[in-house]
Every structure is written in C-alpha cells, then in structure tokens.
Amino acid sequence: SYELTQPPSVSVSPGQTATITCSGDRLGDKYICWYQQRPGQSPMLVIYQDYKRPSGIPERISGSNSGNTATLTISGTQAMDEADYYCHVWDSTTAVFGGGTKLIVL
Amino acid sequence: QVQLQESGPGLVKPSQTLSLTCTVSGGSISSGDYYWSWIRQPPGKGLEWIGYIYYSGNTYYNPSLKSRVTISVDTSKNQLSLNLNSVTAADTAVYYCARDEGAMIALWGQGTLVTVSS
C-alpha cells in the first residue's frame, strides 16, 4: 500500500518561513493536498492540486510537488499557524494521509 | 451552503457494531461528482481514511478495515452511513464524514467521538 511520510514536528520562529515535507514514491506524479488542523477542530483544506489555494487561504501559504517530495511552505509564520498539517493523495481508488506534522511557533 | 453533521452513539461495547450517520444539509447527496467519505482520528493521532461511496454507488474501503466496514447512502434522507463491526478499543476515535472532490476534501463534518469500552 502507498505510504506518505511527514516529519513529526517542525519548529519556526514568528515571522520566519516554515517548511513541511511529505514524501512518497513518485509523489510528483500525483496531485497532493494539505490540511491544517487546529486543536479541537476539523481539518481545513489549505492547498489542493499541489499548489492551489482555496478561497480565503492567504498567499503566504504555498505548496509544491516534484519527484518524491511535496512541500508546504508558510512564509511570515504567525502564532495562528501553529497547528497539525496533513498531506493527502489518492493512490488508484484509495485515499492516503500522511502521519501529520505539528508546526510549533516558538 | 452545504453542511455535514455526524450523529450516533458515543459509546459502543467491544465486539459490537459502530453505526454512524452523516446528514447532508444545504444540498443533495446525490448531486455532483463527489466521493462521500468517512475518516477517523484516534485521540492524539493522525487521520485515517476509512472509505467512501461514490455518487454512482460504488464503494471503496481502506484495505485494513475492508472486512469490517460498510458505507451506504440513503438519498431519501440525504444521509451517509457508516457501519463498523467487531469493534475493539483500537476503533476509539473521532469519526468525520467528508465530501471528497477527488484528492481534495473541502468539506468536513465537525466530527463525533466514539469510544469503545465495556
């Protein structure tokens, strides 16, 4: 079965750039999306089809996907960005989530 | 706008069947090219895809749960249902219903916590 690997946690200082990776075999051949989940809330889509932002998601959140790695980048990180982030792809007819990355804003 | 609301027992005994319903409001469950999904999240852990039913009626399940899961739709009630049998403590989780548009879920329910315990 297909697997996606994320680092358990990433730390960043306010105002700096946070980078969260998601790795999988030939991941660049698939469309990836990213979700943000704050404590006690449902996940929220922040990136779809590798780099597209849903309405209401700020431009400082961006995504890319190439080779075996997809990247979620948050520029000018704010305290409100502290959350868990999950990557998600479809592999044939099944959906796969990464294990999640906790973004810690120090 | 379309909203999803999960409902069902918050406590299920081991070996019994977990049954949840997701009510779709503000839109029809039978319209559009959507994958109506169930996803769960054990306390303090990550998201796990359970399965989905396509608007055409086809179902697809997580291979690790396939033998215990049934997802169905009642179009007359505009509801999505999940049955998971032979539950154990490992099935304790927040269960979400969601509308997947093909590798992107823009619509999630608020989730419902189900605890498996005697």
Image: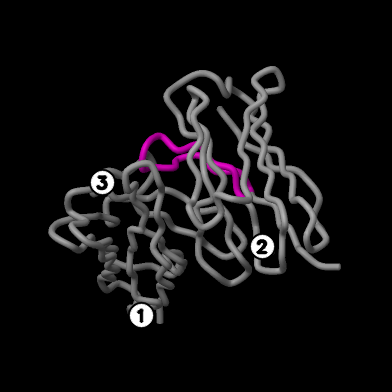
Q: Earlier in the sequence, mark 1 or mark 3?
A: 1
Q: Disc 1 on helix, strand or loop? A: strand
- Are the numbered discs 1 and 2 placed on the same chain, yes or no? no
Spatial CA distance of label 1 from label 3 is 26 Å
- Disc 1 to disc 3: CB gap under 8 Å: no
Instruction: Residue type at mark 3: give it.
Output: Tyr
Q: Disc 2 on helix, strand or loop? A: helix
Spatial CA distance of label 1 from label 2 is 31 Å
- Are the numbered discs 1 and 3 placed on the same chain, yes or no? yes
Q: Is residue B89 left or right of residue A1?
A: right
Q: Residue at x 71, y 22 (%)?
A: B77
Instruction: Residue type at mark 2: give it.
Output: Asp
Magenta span covers which residues?
B96-110
Q: Which residue is denoted by mark 1 in the rendering?
A: A11
The answer to whether B79 is drawn above or below residue A65 in the figure is: above
Q: Residue at x 52, y 45 (%)?
A: B51
Instruction: Residue type at mark 1: give it.
Output: Ser
Q: Nearer the viewer, mark 2 or mark 3?
A: 2
Across and down, in percent, residue A64 comes to 19, 55
Q: Which residue is denoted by mark 3 in the rendering?
A: A31
